[in-house]
Image: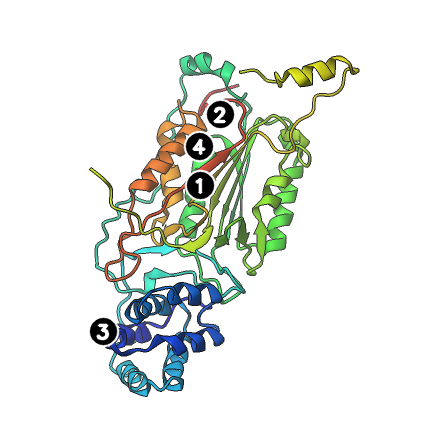
């Protein structure tokens, strides 16, 4: 479903919202909207699960403005087909009275990074078209300009920590690739306004951390695979100490969208850089940053109430003692850490002026703490920043919405970035 509803249709729904909530009969109406593709099976079930028609109407009217530019006409048609002509007539009368050329909002509320879930029907929930107050309570952590500098690691810190950490002294520290899909060739996926801010910010951050950065924008799914495969085969990995992969796009759980609307499974991405497919990076840390939705649920929040390198298994040791000396084997995937913008099943948030909440938090934490903090501990600090943030879109179901980032790790040593340290 393409983007959001036209502004004048949204205003008509808003003006007649109370009437619709009181008089609309949702049962057959929902079935008509599902048959026309305005609602997916999942959406239908979610709305129908509400216990009373009034609550079903609330859920439907909250969702309808995000179901594309044709949703209003299809909705009015469905009202007529379910003998609710008087509601359709009043809605259509409102359209001629609204100001189609209203001045756009200058400080947009957050945008959800969601992507389609079934047959590309899910909306990208672009909230920037909604009416919003002229001032947002979301304060930028770094004014949208990225870090001015990354303080250097001290020689004393390096000397006291390098023995427990991955070796990270090569210059550059490693290669970094950023794939950022902002504009999509399929109308079912909205443009990710603000995504270009994330690209500039991450490129600046990774460069300051002494990574050689390549940026790729608006790639089709197969082109994403090709660029990642080329990245994994680069010969420089053999002499460098780590790598970074950042992917920013619409997404679902376990996959991200190419600009053509086709999915790339994240397990494919991880596989390209694992110990089997990228031996040059064996025993070296590999960092992944995924800025994309992992589902379609909005987190509404709740009210707050006042060691050794090798296996020490005796069985393995006893068995090995009876065998000839063999090569040490590695797990297929190890020494990886992946940070996600949000939890499984939920959406991530993006400000169309300052970029995504997740990247903004990464910038703030890594620029301040990379000098003396393990990467996993920095991601805990990122989680803490995201946890405190709230959406600001009064009058919509997204007001005071929440997000929670997370990371998973197969790191086997401490991972300090040692910024500024010369080899």
**Which type of secondary structure does the marked residue at label 4 adopt?**
helix
Q: Residues within 10 Å of mark 4 (few under 14, many from 20)?
A: some
Provide residue 362's location: percent of width, then percent of height: 39, 38
Task: Estimate the spatial distance between the alpha carbons at disc 3 and disc 1, rounded to whole Å.
Answer: 45 Å
Residue, disc 2? 415
The tag earlier along the polypeptide, 4 or 3, is: 3
Q: Quadrant of residue 369?
A: top left
Task: Estimate the spatial distance between the alpha carbons at disc 2 and disc 3, rounded to whole Å.
Answer: 56 Å
Q: Residues within 10 Å of mark 1 (few under 14, many from 20)?
A: many
The tag earlier along the polypeptide, 4 or 1, is: 1
CB contact under 8 Å: marks 2 and 3? no
Q: Is residue 175 above or below residue 144?
A: above
**Which type of secondary structure does the marked residue at label 1 adopt?**
helix
Q: Is residue 174 above or below residue 271?
A: above
Residue, disc 4? 208
Q: Quadrant of residue 144?
A: top left
Task: Estimate the spatial distance between the alpha carbons at disc 4 and disc 2, rounded to whole Å.
Answer: 17 Å
- For the residues carrying marks 3 and 1, which lies nearer the camera in this image? 3
């Amino acid at each position: 479903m393409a983007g959001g509803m036209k502004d004048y249709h949204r205003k008509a729904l808003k003006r007649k919202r109370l009437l619709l909530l009181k008089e609309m009969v949702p049962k057959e109406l929902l079935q008509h909207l599902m048959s026309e593709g305005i609602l997916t099976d999942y959406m239908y079930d979610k709305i129908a699960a509400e216990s009373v028609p009034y609550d079903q109407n609330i859920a439907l009217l909250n969702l309808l403005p995000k179901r594309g530019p044709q949703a209003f006409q299809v909705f009015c048609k469905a009202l007529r087909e379910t003998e609710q002509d008087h509601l359709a007539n009043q809605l259509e009368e409102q359209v001629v009275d609204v100001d189609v050329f209203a001045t756009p909002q200058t400080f947009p509320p957050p945008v959800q990074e969601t992507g389609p879930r079934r047959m590309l029907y899910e909306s990208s929930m672009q909230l920037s078209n909604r009416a919003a107050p002229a001032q947002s309570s979301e304060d930028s952590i770094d004014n949208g300009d990225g870090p001015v500098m990354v303080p250097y690691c001290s020689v004393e810190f390096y000397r006291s920590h390098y023995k427990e950490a991955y070796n990270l002294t090569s210059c550059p520290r490693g290669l970094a690739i950023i794939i950022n899909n902002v504009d999509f060739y399929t109308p079912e996926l909205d443009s990710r306004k603000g995504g270009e801010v994330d690209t500039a910010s991450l490129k600046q951050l990774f460069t300051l951390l002494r990574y050689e950065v390549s940026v790729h924008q608006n790639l089709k799914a197969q082109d994403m695979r090709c660029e990642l495969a080329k990245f994994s085969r680069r010969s420089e990995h053999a002499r460098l100490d780590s790598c970074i992969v950042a992917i920013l796009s619409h997404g679902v759980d376990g996959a991200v969208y190419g600009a053509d609307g086709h999915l790339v499974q994240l397990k494919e991405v991880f596989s390209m850089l694992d110990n089997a497919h990228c031996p040059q990076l064996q025993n070296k840390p590999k960092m992944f940053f995924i800025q994309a939705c992992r589902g379609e649920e909005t987190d509404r929040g709740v009210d707050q109430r006042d060691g050794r390198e090798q296996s020490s298994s005796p069985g393995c040791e006893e068995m090995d003692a009876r065998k000839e000396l063999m090569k040490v084997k590695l797990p297929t995937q190890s020494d990886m850490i992946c940070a996600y913008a949000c939890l499984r099943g939920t959406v991530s948030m993006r400000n169309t002026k300052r970029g995504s909440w997740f990247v903004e938090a990464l910038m703030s934490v890594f620029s301040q703490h990379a000098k003396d903090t393990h990467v996993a501990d920095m991601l805990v600090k990122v989680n803490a920043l995201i946890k405190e943030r709230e959406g600001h879109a009064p009058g919509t179901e997204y007001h005071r919405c929440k997000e929670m980032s997370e990371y998973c790790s197969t790191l086997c040593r401490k991972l300090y970035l040692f910024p500024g340290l010369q080899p």
